[in-house]
Amino acid sequence: MSPQTDISTEQVRSQVAALVQELLEKAKLSEGDALVVGCSSSEILGGNIGKASSPEVGQAVWAGVTDATEGSGITPIAQCCEHLNRALVVPARLAKARGFERVNAVPQLHAGGSFSCAAYAQIQDAWLVEEVSVEAGLDIGDTFIGMHLKRVASPVRLARTEIGHAHVSAARTRPKYVGGERAHYDPALK
């Protein structure tokens, strides 16, 4: 499938901002939480993931994410593509506070992706880390963000399921249930 240009970067930015805002509300995130976002600009434009990266679309997505999170106390994190093992662009302050281990790579258009390049350029004192465990995530273009969510991930249904041609999904996390009305107990252990 060849890339299409039937969506403007302003539309991308506003649609992403609306989705992130909706996710923040539905996921009940609070100050100090973090949101991982994975994005394929190729998929947004109608191409196959990793095959038609667009710096302009990557920048528009990152701008939409930051528009929605600015002033919320929620830290956005950008997932790189699989060529960087889905490493993440994070502010150094978050990495240090949460004990994330820094790795040495700088995202590029075809090794990290346009979205992570935009985040790396915009985040003051950006670090690349190999893994995180955060409270919520937004996946634009089936980039598989689940590996970076805390347990237990729970789907969040958003009003929009696509940006351009890219499938969109979202998740929040919740504490594990360890008992309750559905739990069964071994009477021999009482």
Image: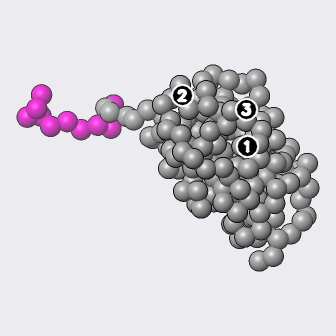
The earlier-in-sequence mark between 3 and 1 is 1
Q: Which mark is residue 96?
A: 2
Q: Are marks 2 and 1 in contact (CB under 8 Å)?
A: no
Element carrying mark 1: helix
Q: Is residue 52 above or below residue 172?
A: below
Give the quarter of the image for residue 53: bottom right
Q: CA distance from mark 3 to mark 1?
A: 9 Å
The earlier-in-sequence mark between 3 and 2 is 2
Task: Give the left or right position of residue 137, taking residue 117 as reference.
Answer: left
Q: Which circle, 3 or 1, is nearer the viewer?
A: 3
The earlier-in-sequence mark between 2 and 1 is 2
- Report the front residue among 122 and 49: 122
- Report the front residue among 173 and 65: 65
Neighbor class of circle 3 (other Cα within 10 Å; few <14, some 14-19, many 20+) is few
Residue at position x 76%, y 23% from top? 71
Residue bearing mark 3: 124
Quarter of the image for the N terminus: give it. bottom right
Q: Are marks 3 and 1 in contact (CB under 8 Å)?
A: no
User: Magenta span has 186?
Assistant: yes
Residue found at the very far left of the displayed protein: 188
Give the quarter of the image for residue 65: top right
What percent of the width, then of the height, locates residue 128? 60, 43
Residue at position x 74%, y 64% from top? 43
What residue range appears in magenta? 180-190
Q: Amino acid at mark 1?
A: Ala
Q: Amino acid at mark 3?
A: Gln
Element carrying mark 3: loop
- Report the front residue among 186 and 51: 51
Residue bearing mark 1: 119
